[in-house]
Image (tube, helix red, strand yellow):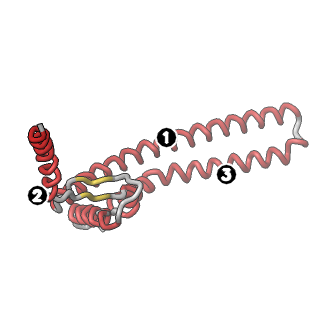
């Protein structure tokens, strides 16, 4: 009976020893990297180019809105000063005109913000797609098994953000037109 128990125990221990020995036998390293997408969007040239493009595209509308807002504020202040001397009908008419101007200003500002957000999302999407391609290229070239974009903590030795930014900047300068900068 003791012999049977020893044989059964030995049979059970063989797979346990085999599992314990397996990691030592197959010491294949798992390489992990980390990319900080916020840094990429702040520091990479394609992101800076997209931001400059948006600023140029929306600068005139923003200036027009600022001018309209200042004019509305000036008209409102003038109305406040002159209201006591105006007749009831003049006061009511100017008040209505100010409310209408304010409504128009608020509508234009809302449309501006919606258009700006939509364009910003389009530009950011292009930068993200490009950055993801570069991350994949870096990962494949340096044989990484996984690249993370969010983590509570990451050892700085696993951070490949600088490599990604350099690669993105290199693709930007190589794909820029001859008279580009």
N-terminal-most mark, 2 or 3 = 2
Task: Locate residue 170, reporting x and y percent.
Answer: 24, 66
The answer for how far apart the CA atoms under marks 2 and 3 are is 75 Å
| Label 2 Cα crowd, 10 Å radius (few <14 / some 14-19 / many 20+) | few
Q: Secondary structure at mark 1?
A: helix
Q: Is residue 11 left or right of residue 57?
A: left
Residue to which mark 2 is pinned: 25
Q: Secondary structure at mark 3?
A: helix
N-terminal-most mark, 3 or 1 = 3
Q: 168 or 91, which is in the foreground?
A: 168
Q: Is residue 117 above or below residue 25?
A: above
Q: Is residue 133 left or right of residue 91?
A: left
Q: Disc number at residue 87?
A: none
Q: Is residue 121 above or below residue 175?
A: above
Residue to which mark 1 is pinned: 114
Q: Is residue 88 above or below residue 24?
A: above
Residue to which mark 3 is pinned: 70
Q: Are marks 2 and 3 in contact (CB under 8 Å)?
A: no
């Amino acid at each position: 009976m003791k012999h049977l128990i020893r044989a059964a125990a030995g049979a059970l221990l063989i797979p346990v020893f085999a599992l314990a020995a397996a990691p030592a036998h197959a010491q294949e390293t798992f390489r992990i990297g980390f990319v900080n997408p916020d840094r990429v969007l702040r520091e990479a040239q394609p992101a800076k180019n997209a931001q400059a493009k948006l600023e140029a595209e929306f600068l005139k509308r923003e200036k027009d809105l600022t001018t309209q807002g200042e004019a509305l504020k000036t008209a409102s202040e003038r109305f406040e000063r002159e209201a006591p001397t105006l007749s009831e009908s003049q006061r009511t008419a100017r008040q209505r005109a100010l409310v209408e101007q304010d409504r128009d200003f608020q509508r234009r500002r809302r449309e501006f913000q919606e258009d700006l957000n939509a364009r910003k999302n389009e530009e950011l999407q292009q930068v993200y797609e490009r950055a993801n391609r570069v991350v994949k290229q870096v990962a494949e070239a340096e044989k990484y098994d996984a690249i993370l974009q969010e983590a509570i903590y990451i050892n700085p030795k696993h951070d490949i953000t600088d490599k990604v930014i350099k690669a993105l900047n290199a693709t930007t300068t190589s794909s820029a037109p001859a008279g580009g900068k």
